[in-house]
Amino acid sequence: MAGMLNASTSYEQRSVIRFLWSKGRTPIEIHREMQPTYWDKCLALRSVWWWCCEFTNGQEDLSDIERSGHPRTSLTLDNIARVDAMVNADRRVHLKVISKELGSSQGSVYGSLGYHKVSCQWVPKLMDDLNKAKRMMTSL
């Protein structure tokens, strides 16, 4: 009896896609066959389609293709700690001030903050039980 795999890599799933593609299966059939095994870790149907097209076009390498573009430099532990310190010191600090302090664009800073702006104050995106209780007591 087949079981669900708790851990799998994208590389492993691509090899399964290549194997089933070589047997003449369609991307939808491949995805349906992979879902019971990989469950919520299964690659999306769109990814299966993409890899089947790549194999049809002669792609043989299963590893990720090197992509162009600038690497993310603003998301470092040092910058995250600096942002946390600034927000904890003043919850009403402006995004412009934070981005100027870090030397990054506002978009990259906002995407990596870990906070949302609510009613002119920064609040954590992911709240633990203590933060939820504090917010509940404040609202009461």
Image (cartoon, rainbow, N blue to C red):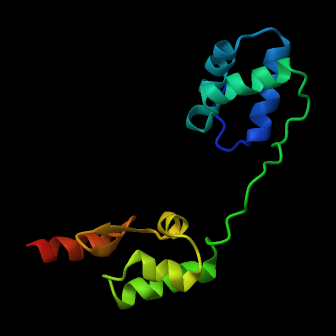
The picture quadrant where one finds residue 54 is top right
Query: Residue 135, relative to residue 38: is it above or below?
Result: below
- Residue shown at the point (14%, 77%) measured from the top left: 138
- Residue at the far bottom: name it: 89
Query: Does 92 sit left or right of 73 as displayed?
Result: left
Q: How many marks?
A: 0
| Percent of width and height locating residue 3 | 65, 29
- Residue shown at the point (78%, 26%) measured from the top left: 16
Give the camera-side residue of 22 and 37. Answer: 22
| Percent of width and height locating residue 30 | 69, 18
Query: Residue 18, relative to residue 138: is it above or below?
Result: above
Image quadrant in which the C terminus is located: bottom left
The picture quadrant where one finds residue 60 is top right
Query: Residue 122, relative to residue 63: is it above or below?
Result: below
Query: Does 108 sit left or right of 18 as displayed?
Result: left
Give the camera-side residue of 41 and 110. Answer: 110
| Percent of width and height locating residue 74 | 62, 72
- Residue shown at the point (60%, 31%) measured from the top left: 44
Image quadrant in which the N terminus is located: top right
- Residue shown at the point (66%, 18%) measured from the top left: 33
| Percent of width and height locating residue 31 | 64, 21
Query: Residue 59, relative to residue 93: is it above or below?
Result: above
- Residue at the far top: name it: 24
Query: Does 99 sit left or right of 20 as displayed?
Result: left
